[in-house]
Amino acid sequence: MAEHGACSSEGTAREWSMGYVMGYRSVPLVRVHVRRQLALWRWGGDAQDAAVVVSELVTNAIQYGRRIGRRVWVRLAVREDGSLVIDVSDPQATLPPRVLDPSLPGPEEERGRGLFLARGLGAELSWFPREFVGKTVRATLEPGPRPGPTSEEEVGGTLRLP
């Protein structure tokens, strides 16, 4: 596997990675590969949610980190506790907007909802610089079903996402 900066295999039960062309046509392919890999591993979490999270991270990497001749790298790792680590690495060292900002963009903004969506699906997001070039954005998902909303989180039939 290629070096991904702060990625560590310690405490990892299973691991998979692949590089993709930095174009939007890669996004559906990544989703298929993620769902297939998680099915092969019989991961205890929601593979569809994981595929959406990966899709959003890869889209951001392509949107904000594209460099001609470079690839976006996707790494999946299931830890011994069953949690899923999703790493998406690109060649840009700068962070995309909203990685550290959990707020929802305004109604007039056309972009910026992907990371909000990932957090709403239960992903814990972080990032770190890669050793030689670029950065990795990491999402961690816990196994098992997402907890349902509490009565305080529902307002007029609308679910407030964290």
Image (cartoon, helix red, strand yellow):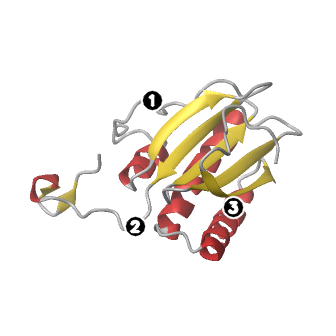
The disc, 3 or 2, on the residue closer to the chain's N-terminal end is 3
Spatial separation of the CA atoms under disc 2 and disc 1: 26 Å
Mark 2 or 1: in front is 2
User: To which quarter of the image does residue 69 belong?
Assistant: top right
Dot 3 or dot 1: first in sequence order is: 3
What amino acid type should be assigned to the residue bearing mark 3?
Val
Residue that mark 3 sits on: 30
Calculate the distance from the C-alpha at mark 3 to the C-alpha at mark 1. 24 Å
Q: Residue at image x 80%, y 34%?
A: 67
SS for dot 2: loop
For residue 95, which quarter of the picture?
top right
Disc on the earlier residue, 2 or 1 = 1
Report if the CB atoms under discs 2 and 1 are less than 8 Å apart. no
Residue at point 51%, 35% (across, down): 126
Please state if 115 lies on the left or on the right of 60 as rendered: left
Instruction: Please give the name of the residue rendered at 41% of the width and 45% of the height, measured from the top-left corner.
Output: 116
Q: Element type at marker 1?
A: loop
Dot 3 and dot 1 residues touching (CB under 8 Å): no
Q: Compared with residue 52, is residue 125 higher up or lower down, i.e. above or below?
A: above
| Residue tagged 1 | 100
Tell me: 81 left or right of 37.
left
**In the image, is residue 141 above or below residue 69?**
below
User: Which mark, residue 144?
Assistant: 2
Residue 5 visible in image: yes
Based on the displayed image, in which of its 4 quarters is residue 91 positioned?
top right
Dot 1: few (<14), some (14–19), or many (≥20) neighbours within 10 Å? few
- Please state which amino acid type lies under the numbered disc 1: Leu
